[in-house]
């Protein structure tokens, strides 16, 4: 919180400094992040296309995977284009309006919470498939999948409402320089001239609730999966069953590990530069890695990708 000053003026625009100290290498960073962003778009669009074109992949697990891929495209698109503009100083560059900043934070939080819930839904799908295979069709019907997906998106949409409302009630009176590459909560709170205790506590509790609720579903699901696998006598059957979970477990570990570190904290004052590195990891690197993890660790997706993008398959059509 900024100290009181009789010369307060309300901030209507923020300046995001991004990555300080990389001015001379800004074109290198621009090229790197642009490549990663384009790669993320192509990968996730490829997953969506492959699932849509291959009838063998029209199953609940891949239904949720397409939702995850759509989400990853939007997730990176909320922050990366503005960050790229800041590197080269076009389209307003590093400047963002007060309303634009809160909107960016709302959408980013909404998508992050939705991803938590989607990963939990995918864990439930794996639990039913492995632990109750005979009832899988009844418990994870298409109607159930649609309701689960809708609940994930709705839950994500509701998550940022109270935190963003409380943020909008704070006074920002200068300086207006955000030491980050997007409008994240912590650097914004550091600029406020109001008492941020309530806002900070609410952020902590909301983040903790989302992470604990979704991670509990994931933990219980995989606890039951492990218990079931231990009672399968055939080693080959155990490996086959567990192989369907490896990609999801890897994605969960990457995403939740960084989120638990970043958001379940109460102190605004922390290592800003280190926070930026972690933010890059979960907002840019993880969405780029997720399609690779699913395609490389899943024989069905890998085979479908090969068939869809095979030159001979297009010539044959």
Image (cartoon, helix red, strand yellow):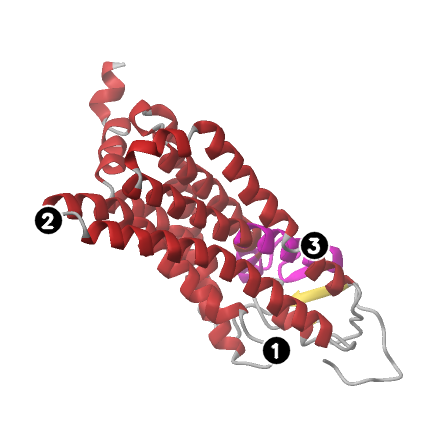
Quick check: 303 above or below 102? Answer: above
Label 1 SS: loop
Mark earlier in primary sequence (1, 2): 2
Report the residue at 53% width, 74% height from top.
20
Quadrant for the C terminus, please: top left
Question: What residue is drawn where x is 48% and y is 55%?
Answer: 214
Q: Nearer the viewer, mark 3 or mark 1?
A: 3
Give the residue at mark 3: 161
Across and down, in percent, residue 69 comes to 43, 42
Q: Where does residue 17 sit, x and y in percent of width and height?
A: 60, 70
The residue closer to the viewer here, 289 or 86, is: 289
| Quadrant placement of the N terminus | bottom right
The question of residue 96 being in magenta is answered with yes
Q: Nearer the viewer, mark 1 or mark 2?
A: 2
Give the magenta part as a residue range: 83-112
Secondary element at tag 2: helix
Q: Which residue is mark 1?
A: 268
Residue closest to the far top: 317
- Mark 2 = which residue? 235
Q: CA distance from mark 3 to mark 1?
A: 20 Å
**Residue 160, x across and y down, in percent:** 65, 56
Mark 3 or mark 1, earlier in chain: 3
Count neighbours of disc 2 (C-alpha within 10 A) and say few if under 14, some if 14 to 19, many if 20 or more: few
Q: Marks 3 and 2, how far apart in space?
A: 48 Å
Q: Mark 1 packing: few (<14 Cα in 10 Å), some, or many (20+)?
A: some
| Image-based side of 68 in relation to 196, left or right | left
Residue 134, position as x, y percentages in the image? 29, 32
Residue 59 lies in what quarter of the image?
Answer: top left
Relative to 1, is 302 above or below? above
Q: Decide if residue 171 is in sight here.
A: yes
């Amino acid at each position: 919180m900024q100290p009181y000053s009789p010369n307060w003026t309300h901030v209507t625009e923020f300046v995001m400094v991004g990555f300080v100290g990389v001015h001379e290498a800004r074109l290198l960073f621009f090229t790197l992040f642009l490549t990663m962003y384009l790669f993320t778009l192509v990968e996730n669009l490829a997953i969506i296309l492959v699932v849509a074109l291959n009838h063998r992949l029209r199953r609940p697990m891949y239904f949720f995977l397409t939702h995850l891929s759509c989400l990853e495209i939007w997730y990176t698109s909320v922050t990366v284009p503005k960050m790229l503009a800041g590197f080269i100083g076009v389209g307003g560059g590093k400047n963002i309006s007060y309303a634009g900043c809160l909107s960016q934070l709302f959408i980013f939080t909404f998508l992050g919470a939705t991803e938590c819930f989607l990963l939990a839904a995918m864990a439930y799908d794996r639990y039913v498939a492995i632990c109750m295979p005979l009832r899988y069709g009844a418990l994870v019907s298409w109607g159930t999948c649609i309701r689960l997906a809708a609940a994930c998106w709705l839950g994500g949409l509701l998550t940022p409402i109270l935190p963003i409302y409380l943020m909008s009630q704070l006074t920002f009176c200068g300086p207006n320089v955000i030491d980050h590459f997007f409008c994240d909560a912590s650097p914004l709170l550091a600029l406020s001239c109001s008492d941020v205790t309530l806002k900070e506590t609410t952020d902590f509790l909301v983040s903790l609730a989302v992470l604990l609720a979704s991670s509990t579903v994931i933990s219980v699901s995989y606890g039951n999966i492990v218990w079931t696998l231990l009672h399968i006598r055939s080693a080959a059957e155990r490996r086959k069953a567990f192989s369907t979970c490896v990609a999801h477990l890897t994605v969960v570990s990457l995403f939740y590990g960084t989120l638990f570190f970043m958001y379940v904290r109460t102190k605004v004052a922390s290592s800003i530069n280190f926070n930026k590195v972690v933010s890059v990891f979960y907002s840019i690197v993880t969405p780029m890695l997720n399609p690779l993890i699913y395609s490389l660790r899943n024989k069905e997706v890998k085979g479908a990708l090969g068939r869809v993008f095979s030159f001979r398959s297009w010539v044959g059509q």
